[in-house]
Image (cartoon, rainbow, N blue to C red):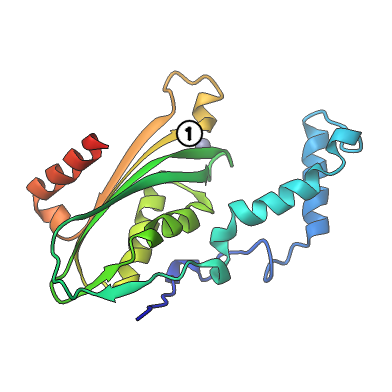
Amino acid sequence: METFTSDPQDTGRPLIQQASPVTDEQLQDAIRTVLKAIGEDPTREGLVDTPDRIVRMWRELFRGYDPTQKPKITTFENDAHNTEMVFDTGDFYSMCEHHCMPFFGQYYFAYIPQDDGRILGISKIARVVGYCSARLQLQERLAHDIIEMLSDALDNQVQGFAIVLKGMHTCKTMRGVKNKGNMCVSYFTGVFRTNPSLREEFYHMIDMQ
Ligand code: ZN
């Protein structure tokens, strides 16, 4: 059985397509204004198509504002009554809301199903990470958004979630700030919050990667 979930966090967020009150033409004009402001000539050959390219790229980079692109999260009955930790890791790429610059790195995710609950299709986790990353984000909020969407998909019938995001922020590294721009955030719910040995087991799995 497939469960389709809605993310209440999405309501009210502006879209760059469909419901967006800004047309592509207006957006391209705004980008030409920015190009002029930094000292460029937006009419020169190399830049003529740049506003159009940026708009098309933003459609993908900011698809996380578009509820129609929300990944469908498959869940299954926990027939095997598995209550072991399920672990997943992969890359994430997002944009910081303070500077509209990329930050990216690794996510480390784990959850413990409920004996009589449902389990996640593990391949969907990367899709949820990708979707929640495709907005102007804070690394802390990104962690929360991912867990909220996955928890929602399981109707909160889960023993606990754990996520660690190790990210590198180009708004820092490209500006030569002494801090190299590396940042690590973690977020725990349920048994991961109340049971330190489970957190240790999770961190041990991260170390083994
Ligand atoms: Zn930033």
Q: Quadrant of residue 8?
A: bottom left
Q: Quadrant of residue 115?
A: bottom left
Taking the image as shown, residue 207 lies to the left or right of residue 178, namely left
Taking the image as shown, residue 151 lies to the left or right of residue 15, namely left
Observer-nearest of 107 and 121: 121
Q: Residue at x 83, y 57 (%)?
A: 25
Q: Residue at x 54, y 32 (%)?
A: 171
Image coordinates for residue 86, horizontal then vertical, percent: 22, 56
Image coordinates for residue 31, horizontal then vertical, percent: 77, 45
Q: Is mark 1 within 8 Å of ligand 1?
A: yes
> Measured along the vertical axis of the image, is residue 107 above or below residue 115?
above
Task: Determine whether the residue tagged by mark 1 lies in a helix, strand or loop.
Answer: strand
Observer-nearest of 141 and 155: 155
Q: Residue at x 20, y 42 (%)?
A: 205
Image coordinates for residue 159, horizontal then vertical, percent: 16, 65
Amino acid type shown at disc 1: His
Which quarter of the image is occupied by the C terminus? top left
**Residue 207, can we see it?**
yes
